[in-house]
């Protein structure tokens, strides 16, 4: 039975269980599973236990952590569906506690460890997992066996469970004078909500616990959280702004009795702890990153009600990927962002994977209100099954998940990342959807819809594109003028790694004319998407990608690229994508040093020695003539252009950068966590995660072989985009 005051129980238990008797006897190791076979006298039946202990994870299993030494009992031999039973040799109970490590599935009947005395089950234990997600980690657990001292017992570890989490991990069975682990309690605490957030203590790298948020007693969301039982590494923000005035209950399914986690959770109106927000040492100063937690893909990028909206794959409660929510930020210019909070949280249909947003101007969906068009989010609910769903809003602040979800049932377990747009000529919505086919060719499915609710399959790309490698994840699809010519607008099908195909589109089928072409030439740029509904008068197609900038030691991790203006330009090989920093970024220029018609000779002193700025934009148009190399030093990163090879090299990256009319144009943006390099009219885009040393503010320029003429050379010191 649940203790009526679990927290109180937790506090009481912790003071007694932690005390060690003054003269404790030596621990007796019952089994440590360090040998090749099971201990003598133990017998295994079935297949789940293999022929002996496993050494960590078995094929197809997630990482198994938390066991001691090299071996453990792992019933994943042959996968979740394998069954079996392992029975120990009889042993005498000689200490008051039997301690062990246990993990895996939570099925007290079919997949559990039992203690038997006189053939009767007297104790049982399981792992913590009873739904998708979770962790393979083993955790300490303990039985109080004082009442059986001196009796003979056996252990029976059984795995008759099949399907998800149909296995068990067990290690290190020890008889002891003290409980290894304080008992795990199902603990709860109530909060009357008067502030936007609850601050949740996080310890990076420890096993997760299931934390359920209930509002007025009703389950809202379950997250897997690395809940700090003592001093946290950082405090996560649990967004409870939608439920002001109500009572929130946080329930932790297995909280160690001596954990301080629940007692330290407190309400707040913003982040607390650590350096001032947005001034943290590894905070990109003009790249979006979440206040707290992890981000990956940009989602639902749309211009609506005079704001740019950036939703994003967000783990509010972890430094790593997990608990996929849609975070939300708005901006007047795609450069200065204000983070608003989490808008789509995991629910019974699964975590909220990537997707897109559209303004339904004609209210085809009927979600509009009082003449206001709805903003509709289209996302993947990545549960079992994995399906496509929608949510809507008219104020772009609160969103309602559609009661008729899903709008597209599962095609394969790996179908995801719907990108939707309005196709004016056919007066239909079109969705491009990535469909992963295990063992088969992945494809992009095209669907059409009159109203965003009912979707019809229209076509499927064949064999990836041109039987080349497949286009992978997060598709985007749009027409783009070639060299600004509105009459010449082929369609571009873009994949997560920014490789793309160019072709024609008739409203149902994509016919590629150019097979998969390389996109960016750098590293750590992924899952980019373009804004929907940028007004026609502006006419730009602006892309933002996930910029994979690890920020170790910070209470946040990863970021987004700067906004990139996309174009197509003619080349001898056909039209090619161009990436250029959006013009709004020039609003960050604090101080500019333009130099014109400068000739730099091989023996010239460094013409950039004057610069001492942390955030830099360098722009150059140069005619290299007979020079061998043109080398820039940007705060410790060395970029070399070879006019002979027409190639930019930086670190281990070598990217083609063609001279055009004998000239190279170059732009370099330098932030605390990365460089973005643009050349040759945007044909070359090199994103590069890079952390300059804080005290290295130097810029350098050197040429070799022959003098180089710089038509222009500009150094702009940039301001932070954060308020
Ligand atoms: C790409 C991706 C998407 C998926 C999302 C989940 O980075 O794998 O395909 O929707 O991340 O976070």
Image: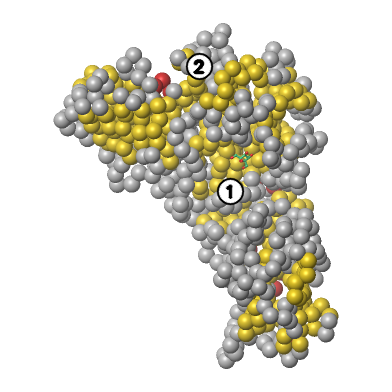
| Image position of 323 (left or right of 706) | right
For the point 53% across and 30% down, the residue is: 498
Q: Which mark is residue 321?
A: 1
How far apart are the two marked residues, 2 and 1, measured between alpha carbons?
Answer: 37 Å
| Image position of 326 (left or right of 522) | right
Counting from the top left corner in percent of width and height, residue 471 is at 60, 31
Element under disc 1: loop
Q: Say which residue label 2 marks.
A: 575
Quadrant assignment for the C terminus = top left
For the point 44% across and 29% down, the residue is: 685
Q: Earlier in the sequence, mark 2 or mark 1?
A: 1
Quadrant assignment for the N terminus = bottom right
Does the Cβ of the disc 2 residue fall within 8 Å of ligand 1? no
- In this view of the protein, can residue 558 be seen by the observer? yes
For the point 46% across and 52% down, the residue is: 552
Q: Which residue lies furthest to the top in this view?
A: 487
> For this rendering, which residue is in front, 713 or 103?
103
Counting from the top left corner in percent of width and height, residue 538 is at 53, 17
Counting from the top left corner in percent of width and height, residue 463 is at 66, 28
Neighbours of disc 1 within 10 Å: few (<14), some (14-19), many (20+): some
Q: Which mark is residue 531?
A: none
Mark nearest the camera among 2 and 1 is 2
Please identify the quarter of the rendering in which residue 407 is found: top right
Does the Cβ of the disc 1 residue fall within 8 Å of ligand 1? yes
Counting from the top left corner in percent of width and height, residue 388 is at 73, 35
The quadrant of the rendered image in which ligand 1 is seen is top right
Q: In this view, does 437 lie above or below 133?
A: above
> For this rendering, which residue is in front, 79 or 701?
79
- In this view of the protein, can residue 4 be seen by the observer? no
Element under disc 2: strand
Q: Residue furthest left?
A: 603
Asked if labels 1 and 2 touch by Cβ distance under 8 angstroms, the answer is no
């Amino acid at each position: 039975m649940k203790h009526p005051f679990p927290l109180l129980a937790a506090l009481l238990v912790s003071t007694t269980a932690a005390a060690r008797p003054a003269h404790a006897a030596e621990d007796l190791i019952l089994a440590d599973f360090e040998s090749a076979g099971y201990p003598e006298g133990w017998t295994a039946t079935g297949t789940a236990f293999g022929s002996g202990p496993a050494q960590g994870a078995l094929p197809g299993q997630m990482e198994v952590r938390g066991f001691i030494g090299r071996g453990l009992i792992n019933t994943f031999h042959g996968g979740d569906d394998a069954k079996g039973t392992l029975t120990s040799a009889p042993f005498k109970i000689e200490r008051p506690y039997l301690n062990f490590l246990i993990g895996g599935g939570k099925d007290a009947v079919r997949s559990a460890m039992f203690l038997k005395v006189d053939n009767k089950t007297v104790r049982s234990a399981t792992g913590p997992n009873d739904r998708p997600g979770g962790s393979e980690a083993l955790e300490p657990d303990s039985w109080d066996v004082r009442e059986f001292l001196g009796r003979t017992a056996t252990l029976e570890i059984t795995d008759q469970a099949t399907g998800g989490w149909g296995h068990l991990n067990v290690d290190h069975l020890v008889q002891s004078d003290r409980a290894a682990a304080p008992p795990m309690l199902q603990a709860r605490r109530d909060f009357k909500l008067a502030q936007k957030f609850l601050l949740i203590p996080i310890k990076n790298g420890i096993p997760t616990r299931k934390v359920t948020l209930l509002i007025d007693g009703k389950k809202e969301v379950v997250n897997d959280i690395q809940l700090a039982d003592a001093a946290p590494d950082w405090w996560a923000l649990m967004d409870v702004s939608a439920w002001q005035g109500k009572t929130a209950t946080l329930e932790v399914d297995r909280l160690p009795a001596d954990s301080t986690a629940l007692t330290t959770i407190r309400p707040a109106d913003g982040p607390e702890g650590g350096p001032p927000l947005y001034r943290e040492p590894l905070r990109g100063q003009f790249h979006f990153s979440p206040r707290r937690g992890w981000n990956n893909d940009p989602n639902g990028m749309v211009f609506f009600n005079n704001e740019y909206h950036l939703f994003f794959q967000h783990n509010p409660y972890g430094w790593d990927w997990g608990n996929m929510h849609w975070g939300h930020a708005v901006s007047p210019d795609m450069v200065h962002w204000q983070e608003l909070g989490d808008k789509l949280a995991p629910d019974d249909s699964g975590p909220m994977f990537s997707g897109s947003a559209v303004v339904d101007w004609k209210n085809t969906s009927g979600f509009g209100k009082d003449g206001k068009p709805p903003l509709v989010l289209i996302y993947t609910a990545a549960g079992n099954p994995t399906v496509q769903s929608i949510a809507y809003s008219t104020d772009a602040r609160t969103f309602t998940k559609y009661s008729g979800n899903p709008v597209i049932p599962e095609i394969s377990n790996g179908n995801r990342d719907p990108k939707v747009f309005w196709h004016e000529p056919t007066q239909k919505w079109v969705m491009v959807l990535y469909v992963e086919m295990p063992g088969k060719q992945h494809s992009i499915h095209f669907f059409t819809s009159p109203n965003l609710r009912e979707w019809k399959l229209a076509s499927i790309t064949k064999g990836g594109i041109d039987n080349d490698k497949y286009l992978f994840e997060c598709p985007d699809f749009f027409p783009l003028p070639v060299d600004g010519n509105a009459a010449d607008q082929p369609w571009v099908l873009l994949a997560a790694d920014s490789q793309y195909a160019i072709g024609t589109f008739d409203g149902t089928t994509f016919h590629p004319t150019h097979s998969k072409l390389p996109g960016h030439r750098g590293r750590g740029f992924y899952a980019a998407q373009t804004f929907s509904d940028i007004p026609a008068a502006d006419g730009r197609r602006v892309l933002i990608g996930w910029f994979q900038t690890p920020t170790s030691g910070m209470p946040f991790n990863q970021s987004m690229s700067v906004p990139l203006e996309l174009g197509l330009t003619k080349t001898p090989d056909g039209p090619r994508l161009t990436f250029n920093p959006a013009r709004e970024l020039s609003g960050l220029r604090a101080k500019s040093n333009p130099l014109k018609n400068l000739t730099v000779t091989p023996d010239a002193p460094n013409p950039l020695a004057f610069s001492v700025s942390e955030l830099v934009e360098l722009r150059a148009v140069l005619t290299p003539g007979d020079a061998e190399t043109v080398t820039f030093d940007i705060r410790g990163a060395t970029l070399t252009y070879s006019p002979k090879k027409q190639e930019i090299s930086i670190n281990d990256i070598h990217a083609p950068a063609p001279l055009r009319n004998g000239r190279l144009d170059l732009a370099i943006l330098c932030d605390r966590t990365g460089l973005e390099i643009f050349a040759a009219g945007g044909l070359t885009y090199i994103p590069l995660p890079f952390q300059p040393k804080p005290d290295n503010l130097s810029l350098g320029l050197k040429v070799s072989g022959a003098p180089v003429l710089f038509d222009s050379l500009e150094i702009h010191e940039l301001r932070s985009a954060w308020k």
